[in-house]
Amino acid sequence: MEIETLLQHIDLGEDQNIEFKAADGGLPKDLWPTLSAFANTDGGCIVLGVREKQGEFEISGVSNPRSLQTTFWNTHNNREKLNTPICSDVKVINIDGYNLLIINIPKATPKQQPVYINNNPMTGTYKRGNEGDYRCSKEEIQQMFRDASNDAQDSKILDGFDFKDLDLDTLKSFRQRFSSREPDHIWLSLDDQQLLDQLGGWKRDRQTGKEGLTIAGLLMFGRERSILDAFSHYQLDYQEHLSNDPEERWTYRLTLDGKWEPNLFNFYYRVYLRLVDNLDVPFKLDQYYVRKGETHVHEALREALVNTLIHADHQSSRPIKIIKELGGFRFSNPGLLRIPLESLYKGGVSDPRNPNLQKMFQMLGLGEKAGSGFPQILRAWKEQQWFDPLVSEKSDIGVTEITLPMISFIPEDVGQEIKKIVGDSYCNLTELDRIILALVHQFGEISNFDIQRYRKEHPRDISEHLRTLVQNRWLRQAGRGRGTRYTLFNNQFSQPSLFSSSEHLPVSSEHLPVSSEHYERLKKIAEPIREKGSVKKELVEDVILQLCCEQYLLLRTLAELLGREPDSIRNHYVNPLLDRGLLELKHPKQKNHPQQAYRTVSC
């Protein structure tokens, strides 16, 4: 880290990827949980020799920095303390006569995770969140161990499962589609078990002699009851949101309901037809729903759907969710990326979580090899001059999302709404300013990193433009550091993120009758929380109860007032207050109501 950048951080305070510690008495004990958290999230930097005093940070320096550096390396390389020596860049710098020890922690690869301390992964594994470091749950740790294994997740033999757990009609349909594409393929002469063996759906362990149905075979061809017996949290969810009525949660939904066999093969063909239905670009499918004069957009949707199914961590408790809306699509699967995000956008690198499932789809002409699938999606969207697809990892819940908006950059109606926000200043906006405002309008909220997907400016330049837009009260800022998100300040014009939760829907005066005077009063109440990074939970709860004392408030409004992420407010504060009977719901019979709001029970 450059000295100038470090001084800026000291002036602004800690954030998602930097933490200061005084280190007056040697290496602080809480250094190691923070190191684990940085390594298991996005990497970061620990600076020893900076202390906090009355909410401000100041350089205090460390004594005997070389000795401290040696102590760090000795502890770092002790497997009883840290299971994976992750660091390689630890140095001493001098600022105005004060020595500081800078510890740079890289992001651990999936094969290195989890990085844990004290020789105990279940209690010593941490991640970085908006509220600071937190101890990972058992499910998060198990997910990291699954990704670190050299064995393919879908190649495991399932004890107690056999051909009776398969839907033979599905297997027959697979043969028909395979035959239509490769009529002379030698595998078509095999019986069902032999074919399944070639596909990776049936396996014999050469060391033990044990054989049986694999995870891939059950997921691709299994019966509903059998799949649920193996994976109790298995959930496929396809939704269409094609109505402007906020009271209508979806216009169509396909999920597990006992009316069909919800294996991945059947799910793919049912969902793909609906994804491309009414698509405003010409194409044709043959009788087997295989490409025939189709456009690149159809290829892209097929790739996105297949990738969602083959890259999912099917042992997670999170669902596979696919949403089609008037403005685009979202594909969400449990499991984080196994390659760097930059490599995904560039293409050419592939590390499938379920290679046997990938092979099964490829035999049907579905899914690309060698990491070329996502570049095909980018190409299709660029040809249509739509917003580029946006990939985001939600590390706190272990989910990857791909957003495919079918909207052009700054359409006329969006430009008009931006003009309403900035007024006469619109003509003075730079091109980058307008693009940022259009991106926030489109996605509901966005970060500096997200903007970099659309612009070539340096992140520092983007930060300066974001800061100006915030100062002019055109954007609202929430969070800190790399976790900082931006929304339109005047949310009456803000469109919902294509695939955000229902609490992010646009707010009209009918649902949120908060006058500007009242809102300013609420801002003053929330100021102690909004202006500080780390606050005791009890204080945040007390402020929330004060804010909701006079009337119902939406989760989004609470998040804006407190300067926190909506999910964080809901999970850490609102839900516990509801459980304790201190808050009440505006719509108690519909917990997930699009305009759900909260009020204090007794002020």
Image (cartoon, grey):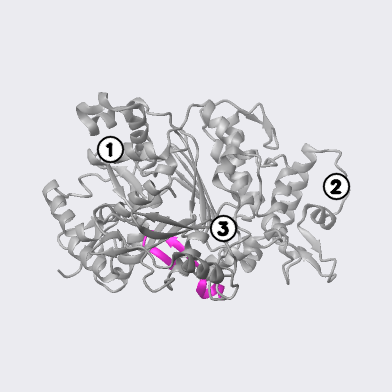
Please indicate whether residue 279 sits to the left or right of residue 416 in the image: right
| Residue pictured at 34% horizontal, 37% vertical | 441
User: Is residue 133 one of those drawn in magenta?
Assistant: yes
Q: Which residue is label 3 attached to?
A: 88
**From mark 1 to mark 3, how far is it between C-alphas?**
38 Å
Q: Kindly indicate whether the residue at mark 1 contacts the one at mark 2 (C-beta within 8 angstroms).
A: no
Question: Which residue in the protein does label 2 denote?
Answer: 187
Query: How far apart in space, not on screen, are marks 3 and 2 (Cα)?
Result: 50 Å
Q: Nearer the viewer, mark 3 or mark 2?
A: 3
Q: Height in image: 502 above or below 578?
A: above
- Which residue is the extreme one toward the left? 517
Pointer 1 residue: 469
> Front-most of 145 and 574?
145
Place of residue 37 in the rendered image (x, y in percent of width and height, measured from the top left): 48, 63
Foreground mark, 1 or 3, reads 3
Do the CB atoms of the residues marked 1 and 3 lie less than 8 Å apart?
A: no
Q: Quadrant of residue 578?
A: bottom left
**Which residues are the magenta region?**
120-136
- Going from N to C along the chain, the mark reached first, 3 or 2, is 3
Q: Is 598 within the magenta?
A: no
Label 1 secondary element: helix
Does label 1 or label 3 sit earlier along the sequence?
Answer: 3
2 or 1: mark nearer the eye:
1
Asked if residue 360 shows in the view, the reply is yes
- Distance from disc 2 to disc 1, alpha carbons, whole Å, reads 61 Å
The amino acid type found where label 1 is placed reads Leu
